[in-house]
Every structure is written in C-alpha cells, then in structure tokens.
C-alpha cells in the first residue's frame, strides 16, 4: 500500500511526459498501479467479506444493500436456501438451483453480490443442481428464519424490517419464490364444441412448498399485487398454490415469467 505522497510523486514523473515503463523502472511501482492512480488517486479501503460491517449489527440496525435484490433473494432462500456454520465462526449461504435453469443460477449470483458486495460467490456443482454459495459471518442476521430442522417443521415468519421490504417490493419476493419452488406450465382440457371434443390450452402458475407459513407469505404477497389464487391438495394436504385466472396469469407473466 503506497501512501498518497508517493502516489503524487510517481504521477508527477508521468506528467513530465515520461512513459509508464520508465517511471516503473525508476520507482519500482508497477505500471498497473500507475495506470490505476491516474483514474483514482486515493487509496481504496480494503475490507474482507468476513469483516465487512453488518447492517443489522449496527447500534441502529439498517436495511441490507439493494433491498430489491434482497426481496428476491429472500424468496429464493425460503424456497431452496439454507445457512450452515463454517470454520472459524463463519457461515455459508447456499441456494440450490436446478441445472435446467442457467438464467436462474446467474440471477441468484447477481442477487447475492448486490446484497453482500464485499463477499465472494461460488457455484458448486451437485448432481442435477448447482449450489450457489457465499461465505460470511452475518448471513443469519440477514436471514433470521435460519434454525435447526426443516423449514416446514418449524415456525417461519418475517421480521418487521423484512416485511417492510417485501411490502415495498412484492414482485421481487414473488419471483424469488416462484424461481425456487414454483413453475409456469401449460395446462390443457377438452370441451365439446358442436358435438366434437376440442382441446384448449392455457398457462398456469404453481407454487409448491410443504411449509404452510411460507405458502401463506406467498399468498399474502399475491394479494398485495392483485393476483387471484387457489390452493390444490395432494393426499389431502394443501401443498400447492395455483394461479390460473387469465388476468392474474397476465400479471404474473408481466412481472415473473417462466424460468430460463
């Protein structure tokens, strides 16, 4: 790390018309550093992902960076995410994304980078899926729904600050939930027209999750944006939320769309 005086002296040599190569040889400073100082003289603060300040741990807790991205990432986390302990007190956030949807994998990576810009994001290939992973010390601060056991076997509720974000950005939250545990499909049925059976096709969204709490969070967000929905049961258990009305599907298509 070079101090500001050294930087100014080196750039003064460059300003005399000397080449970066000659100044580098005289000072021992790399040409890359000299080029960088020409656009940004002040030293940039160095901050590791583990020591980055946590917005929730401040004396007055704040909101995460990029709240729209956080709302989307919260949906992904509730559907297919988990936070696990790692070595030396760190944690890793993992979001499982199917191999079939490369666009989803990139959207997940982009959301994590937006929410935690100081951290790194890696994609670990598993059988049939990719675990998008990021390490840090404060993922449980950002996702207080973390806990022992499966999500559908324990209470899941948003904290007030999370609900405020979802209320402000409901479509991002809905999109995250659909991208994790939902789908857009084409249904079909037959009707008699003039005595002859005729096939009709229509699009439909499904959201499937064992947690009644998470399904209710999804339905609350749908209500907020004016999407009509129904529930369907499997083995007598209401596991699925269905959106099939034409106007509601059109709204979902405009803001969510199919996975890709």
Image (cartoon, rainbow, N blue to C red):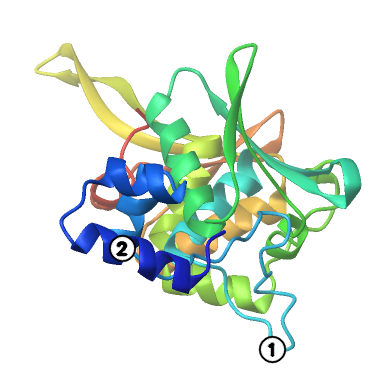
Sequence order check: which comes first, mark 2 or mark 1? 2
Q: Quadrant of the C terminus?
A: top left
- Which x, y percent locates residue 6? 46, 66
Mark 2 lies on residue: 11
- Farthest residue to the bottom: give it: 60
Residue 129, quarter of picture: top right
Q: Are there few (<14), some (14-19), or many (20+) residues within 10 Å of tag 1? A: few
* Residue depicted at 57% across the width and 55% down the height: 118
Relative to the observer, which residue lies in front, 180 or 33?
A: 33
Where 116 sits versus 19, above or below? below
Residue 84, quarter of picture: top right
Relative to the observer, which residue lies in front, 99 or 177?
A: 99
Query: Any mark on residue 60, and which?
Result: 1
* Residue depicted at 43% across the width and 63% down the height: 68
- Which x, y percent locates residue 112? 53, 49
Where 114 sits versus 250, above or below? below
Q: Secondary structure at mark 1?
A: loop
């Amino acid at each position: 790390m070079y101090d500001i005086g050294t930087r100014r002296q080196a750039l003064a040599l460059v300003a005399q018309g000397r080449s970066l190569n000659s100044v580098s040889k005289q000072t021992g400073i790399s040409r890359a550093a000299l080029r960088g100082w020409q656009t940004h003289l002040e030293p940039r603060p160095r901050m590791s992902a583990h020591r980055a300040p946590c917005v929730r741990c401040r004396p007055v807790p704040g909101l995460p960076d990029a709240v729209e991205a956080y709302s989307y990432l919260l949906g992904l986390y509730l559907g297919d995410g988990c936070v696990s302990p790692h070595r030396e007190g760190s944690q890793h956030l993992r979001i499982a994304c199917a191999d079939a949807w490369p666009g989803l994998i990139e959207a997940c990576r982009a959301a994590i980078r937006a929410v935690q810009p100081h951290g790194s994001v890696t994609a670990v290939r598993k059988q049939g899926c990719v675990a998008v992973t990021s390490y840090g010390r404060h993922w449980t601060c950002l996702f207080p729904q973390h806990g022992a056991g499966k999500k559908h076997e324990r209470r899941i509720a948003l904290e007030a600050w999370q609900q405020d974000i979802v209320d402000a950005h409901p479509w991002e939250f809905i999109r995250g939930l659909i991208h994790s545990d939902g789908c857009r499909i084409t249904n079909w049925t037959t009707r008699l027209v003039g005595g002859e059976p005729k096939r009709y096709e229509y699009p439909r969204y499904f959201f499937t999750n064992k947690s009644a709490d998470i399904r209710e969070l999804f339905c609350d967000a749908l209500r907020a944006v004016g999407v009509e929905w129904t529930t369907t049961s499997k083995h007598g258990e209401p596991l699925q939320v269905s959106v099939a009305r034409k106007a509601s599907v059109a709204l979902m298509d405009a803001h969510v769309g199919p996975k890709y």
